[in-house]
Image (spheres, rainbow, N blue to C red):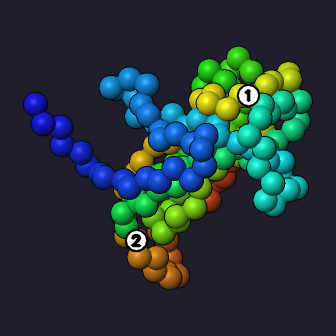
Amino acid sequence: MTTIHDLDVCCRIVRPSGALPERATDGASGYDLRMAGWRWPWQTTEISTGNLTLDAGERALIVTGFAMALSPGWEAQIRGRSGLALRNGLLVAFGTIDSDYRGEVGVIVANVGDRITLKPGDRVAQMVFARVPSVRLMLAHDLGTTARGDGGFGSTGQS
């Protein structure tokens, strides 16, 4: 049986410890990203390829060791892994990889739990592909009315 794909993405391994993202199951929407290295937020270029230990409140940039070329009209969204968040308190900053970016894919992580140690090859995040519509924003003097109006955060009540 021939599999038809919605999107072909050319990828390149950019460091020896890099790996291509993989889906854990056939039904998974996210492709798991593995740690190939990391750096502290205040460093600009020095990548460590050893273990990363994050104390509560610390954050780091994890590099994946691969780069990709998305087609125009597509993006990749970087998301957390629910198990790491629940069990260990490791949060992933939601990120967007644009179709014109060709650098190494990175993942920003923050630890809101107890001390955690991540090793090269650990699955640290997931990547989901999405279409990006072509949108035209138009200036208008009147936006019409709705029952909610301009009510913001928490305006729809609690339940």
Query: Of all residues shown, which one is farthest toward the top?
Result: 87
Please tell me whether mark 1 sits on a helix, a strand or a loop. Answer: strand
The answer to whether residue 26 is left or right of residue 139 is: left
Quarter of the image for residue 1 reads: top left
Circle 2 residue: 135
**Which residue is more in the foreground, 44 or 133?**
44
Q: Nearer the viewer, residue 2 or 155?
A: 2
Describe residue 97's horizontal placement relative to residue 62 as left or right.
left
> Which amino acid does the dot numbered 1 rest on?
Leu
Side of 74 relative to 19 (left or right) = left
Q: Residue 134: give x, y in percent of width and height.
A: 37, 70
Above or below, 144 relative to 6: below
Q: Residue 118, which numbered label?
A: 1
Between 6 and 45, which is closer to the camera in this rendering? Answer: 45
Q: Residue at x 42, y 48 (%)?
A: 129
x, y percentage for residue 16? Answer: 60, 44
Locate residue 7, reporting x and y percent. 30, 52
| Secondary element at image label 2 | loop
Q: Residue furthest front?
A: 16
Circle 1 crowding by C-alpha within 10 Å: few under 14, some 14–19, many from 20: some
Q: Earlier in the sequence, mark 1 or mark 2?
A: 1
Label 2: few (<14), some or many (≥20) within 10 Å?
few
Residue in the picture at 71% in, 28% down: 119
